[in-house]
Amino acid sequence: METRSDKREASLLRSLPSIDRLLQTEAVQLLLATYPHDLVVEGLRGSLDSAREGIRHGEDPPSPPALVADARGRIGAAIQPTLRPVINATGVILHTNLGRAPLSDATIAAMEAVARGYSSLEYDLDAGGRGSRHEHVAALLRRTTGAEAGLVVNNNASGILLALAALATGKEVVISRGQLVEIGGGFRIPDVLRQSGAKLVEVGTTNRTYGEDYAAAIGDETALLLRVHASNFRVLGFTHSASIEDLVHLAKSRGLRVVDDLGSGSLLPTEEYGLAHEPMVQESVRVGADVVAFSGDKLLGGPQSGILVGRADVIERLRRHPLTRAVRPDKATLAGLRATLLHYVEGAAEREVPVWRMIATPTVDLDRRARSIVEALGSPNLDAVHTESAVGGGSTPGETLPSRAVAISSTGEGAQALATRLRRWSMPIIARVADDRVLLDLRTVSPSEDGEIVSALRTTCVV
Ligand SMILES: *Cc1c(COP(=O)(O)O)cnc(C)c1O
């Protein structure tokens, strides 16, 4: 039997305007001047669906202007990009989820210049004919790393895959059990080896592997020795691993190759910045590794890319492999990488490359900025506090740099709720939560973003 409330509900549902009628209104005509018809109809349909749902739960129907305002919000949300700039206040400098290395001004300018129009990507301007995209950074890679040759691919993962496929398909690759690691995002060394068509030969134990272990495993089918930097964990205590020198020495005596996956790979000495020594590309090149692989967007501080440097004949073999075509970098990457490498050649990396600028920023500077943000807001909930930043991105695992943060103590709603609100700010701010406080670590925040932080804190009802 139909009750009175059923009747009321049916009549309220009937009172909602149709999409056609809403399309005639002036407010929707204005929306149609900006947005495509389909998107507007989709927004209106969403608003009407939600209004019907509300009526069924006993709510009053929204007015037509309220329906249109709701539709406008839905349209806005539908075209809002999901990939957006954010403020990284986590203190993790190379944050993979937040896009790793921010780029230098010169790098951005170089990428923009080639993105805007045509370029000499594969065109030899002297000869007036076909050139190679691999030439643009080759000289700078030789100069910065000391290697005979270099090759750029999409990322380090594809670089390792290419090196193994070109040098060891159908053959054996010897690697320490302590280096069969997962880098993150499901990139596991044993899986990559299998994909390359190489056969994995494990030697040693999780914590100790000696040169003799490699020597004993070498046979007729062995093609190369692979070293993988333990970039995101530390094994402490009773440990030993064969040095890259040991591996190169052994490989030479047996006619094999050595591939060294440095992960981050640094061109500058991290120990001069109060961190543990991160393996440097130049060191592996100097001792004679055939291929040294590292990322362009970790400690190098450039655009996403994978860099392979080493002996000229070996790099040439990689360059000719069919996989190289599948993992080749685009013009913007090459232009940007060149500009980033130039900072190193000019001795200006610490000043120009944002990753190094952040690592090198003295805590007194961070302290001054933290205090000035706290003073600008004048709230008892805010405090300038000591904290620890991390390099991240598979470099210097377990190491921290002293830093300063703006700490926001719980404002009743709880620290997680406040962190969520900061994340939903028009310029999303990604913070850290510790001891029921929100921490904004300024080491990874550009000084030009301090004003945005003040505005966000003022409006997210902190003060
Ligand atoms: C990060 C890392 C990789 C993967 O590099 P991408 O540039 O992210 O593809 C591979 N090996 C090691 C040791 C790493 O640290």
Image (spheres, helix red, strand yellow):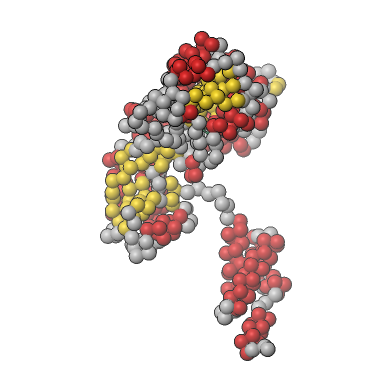
Work out whether residue 105 can be spotted: no
The residue under the point 61% across, 30% down is: 194
In terms of depth relative to the viewer, which is nearer, 251 or 31? 251
* 118, above or below 144, in the image: below
The residue under the point 58% across, 75% down is: 54
Q: Is residue 428 left or right of residue 434?
A: right
* 354, above or below 141, in the image: below
Residue at the far right in the pictured view: 20
The residue under the point 45% across, 32% down is: 231
In terms of depth relative to the viewer, which is nearer, 286 or 335? 286
Q: Position of residue 361 (x, y in %)?
A: 34, 37
- Quadrant of the snapshot with the N terminus: bottom right
Toward which corner of the image does residue 322 lie, by quadrant?
top right
Work out whether residue 97 can be spotted: yes
* 393, above or below 18, in the image: above
Toward which corner of the image does residue 321 lie, by quadrant?
top right
